[in-house]
Image: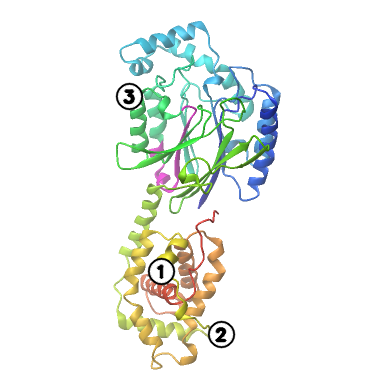
């Protein structure tokens, strides 16, 4: 199962100059072109929708509606949070914030703040809340401040990092209200299927903008509730960071650029693909070329982006699937070589028609290159090695006419080869192709074979691995393929 989504941040819609005006129009066209490659599952808009607390006018609403129409999303799949420019400031609110920040323990002070003072702080985002209701059609959960969205493919924690936003230079002092944040993130545990989905968190500010002790607390929450990725904006310059938690599990922090062009902002947005089956993640940064006036992929963001994509492995998702494979393998019955020979002979016997398949055993591509090009997992390689000890049994049968007549020697290779050709373009890594061939061969032949389900599948797995070793399959290069 695959996920594809976009993150766009810092629109600052009321900011206008010619380059920005043109860039925004071209962005809609560019998103429409990206949509042709594959569907998007959702869109993240990570704050600063307005500019300097200005009103949200009809032009802004129309622009955002045009954006989601072009990428064919409905409002349920749009996730929107406020930025510091979406806050209106007044003197009373400023005094309350200053009092919090001057206290001995500002984080605890915010959690214990009396309801009236807290409401005065939150009212600074009233224009944004009203816009959210108007655009999204539902109320922003302003009393909770932070909230969790759950779906079949992903969980999304929306963090309001702008509660205390009030002035320039506040980076490193921002607070989130730890109690409210914890109440939101702990809901992830209520869904037992969370191990099957991607866990995301979004905020307008980078984690570096949060007060240090609270930042570490957030990282601990991310670790406890298996957050795989945090996406933010604010700094108007895109970046990426693999952030180590207090445990051994990292998470990926992605920062998007802005959708304005001024003397320091870098116009840029992020496209993310995640394979939920193995954790393979590809991040593409799309940047505005100011000289020639077009959107394009950015390969200037460091060595890991030199080919225009950041490749990353979400280890939690990989481990989840490795554990599934281990669980399946642990239930396999022991293999008896004599019975395996009988299986191969029986397999040939149930084939009513065939065409000779001539494999060229002298033209084998090294296994390590096959596994690299096919993006095969380490677990697959380990299982392949364990199955390879039985290749001698297969070759013994193939080298003798005592078991199978000479004119039927290539039936197994032919069958697997045909299945490979049928399915290899449908998937983007060797593990998925292997499992598809296995399941289709099992469905087609198991009723004719007098063996248990576990043994039948194990025998077929060995035959497929043998065919990978001996025959011309697994020679494609899947490293640049995204589905």
Residue 99, placed above or below residue 248: above
For the residues marked 2 and 3, what is the alpha-carbon distance in whole angstroms?
Answer: 70 Å
Of residues 205 and 409, the one drawn nearer to the viewer in this rendering? 205
Residues packed near mark 3 inside 10 Å, few (<14), some (14 to 19) or many (20 plus):
few
**Colour pattern:** rainbow
Residues packed near mark 2 inside 10 Å, few (<14), some (14 to 19) or many (20 plus):
few
Residue 56, placed above or below residue 258: above
Of residues 124 and 207, the one drawn nearer to the viewer in this rendering? 207
Residues packed near mark 1 inside 10 Å, few (<14), some (14 to 19) or many (20 plus):
some
Seen at 53% across and 83% down, the residue is 357
Seen at 40% across and 47% down, the residue is 195
Residue 200, placed above or below residue 86: below
Work out whether residue 71 can be spotted.
no
For the residues marked 1 and 2, what is the alpha-carbon distance in whole angstroms?
Answer: 27 Å
Q: Which mark is residue 355?
A: 2
Residue that label 3 marks: 213
Of badges 2 and 3, the one in the foreground is: 3
> Residue 242: where, in percent of width, then height?
40, 40
């Amino acid at each position: 199962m695959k996920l594809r989504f976009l993150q766009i941040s810092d629109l600052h819609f009321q900011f206008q100059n010619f380059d920005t005006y043109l860039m925004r129009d071209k962005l809609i066209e560019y998103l429409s072109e990206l949509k042709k490659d594959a569907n998007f599952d959702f869109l993240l808009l990570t704050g600063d929708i307005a500019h300097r607390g200005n009103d949200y006018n009809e032009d802004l609403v129309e622009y955002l509606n045009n954006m989601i129409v072009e990428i064919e999303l409905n409002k349920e799949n749009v996730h929107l949070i406020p930025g510091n420019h979406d806050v209106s400031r007044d003197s009373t609110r400023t005094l309350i914030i200053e009092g919090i920040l001057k206290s001995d323990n500002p984080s605890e002070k915010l959690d214990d703040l009396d309801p009236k003072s807290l409401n005065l702080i939150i009212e600074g985002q009233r224009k944004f809340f009203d816009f959210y209701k108007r655009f999204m059609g539902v109320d922003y959960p302003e009393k909770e401040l932070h909230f969790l969205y759950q779906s079949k493919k992903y969980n999304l924690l929306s963090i309001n990092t702008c509660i205390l936003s009030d002035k320039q230079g506040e980076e490193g002092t921002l607070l989130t209200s730890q109690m409210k944040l914890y109440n939101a993130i702990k809901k992830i545990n209520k869904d037992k299927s969370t191990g099957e989905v991607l866990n995301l968190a979004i905020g307008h500010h980078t984690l570096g903008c949060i007060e240090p002790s609270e930042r570490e607390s957030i990282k601990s929450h991310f670790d406890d509730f298996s957050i795989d990725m945090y996406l933010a904006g604010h700094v108007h310059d895109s970046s990426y960071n693999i952030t180590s938690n207090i445990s051994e599990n990292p998470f990926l922090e992605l920062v998007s650029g802005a959708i304005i062009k001024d003397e320091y902002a870098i116009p840029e947005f992020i496209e993310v693909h995640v394979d939920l089956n193995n954790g393979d993640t590809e991040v593409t940064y799309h940047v505005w070329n100011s000289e020639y006036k077009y959107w394009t992929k950015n390969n200037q963001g460091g060595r890991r982006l030199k080919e225009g994509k950041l490749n990353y492995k979400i280890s939690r998702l990989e481990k989840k699937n490795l554990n599934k494979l281990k669980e399946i393998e642990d239930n396999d019955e022991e293999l008896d070589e004599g019975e395996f020979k009988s299986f191969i002979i029986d397999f040939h016997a149930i084939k009513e028609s065939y065409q000779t398949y001539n494999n060229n055993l002298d033209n084998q591509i090294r296994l390590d290159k096959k596994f690299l090009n096919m993006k095969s997992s380490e677990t697959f390689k380990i299982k392949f090695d364990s199955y390879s000890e039985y290749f001698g049994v297969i070759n013994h049968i193939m080298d003798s006419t005592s078991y199978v007549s000479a004119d039927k020697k290539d039936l197994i290779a032919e069958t697997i080869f045909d299945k490979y050709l049928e399915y290899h373009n449908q998937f983007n890594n060797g593990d998925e192709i292997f499992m598809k061939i296995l399941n289709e061969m099992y469905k087609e032949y198991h009723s004719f074979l007098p063996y248990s389900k576990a043994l039948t599948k194990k025998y077929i797995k060995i035959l497929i691995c043998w065919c990978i070793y001996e025959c011309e399959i697994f020679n494609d290069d899947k490293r640049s393929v995204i589905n």
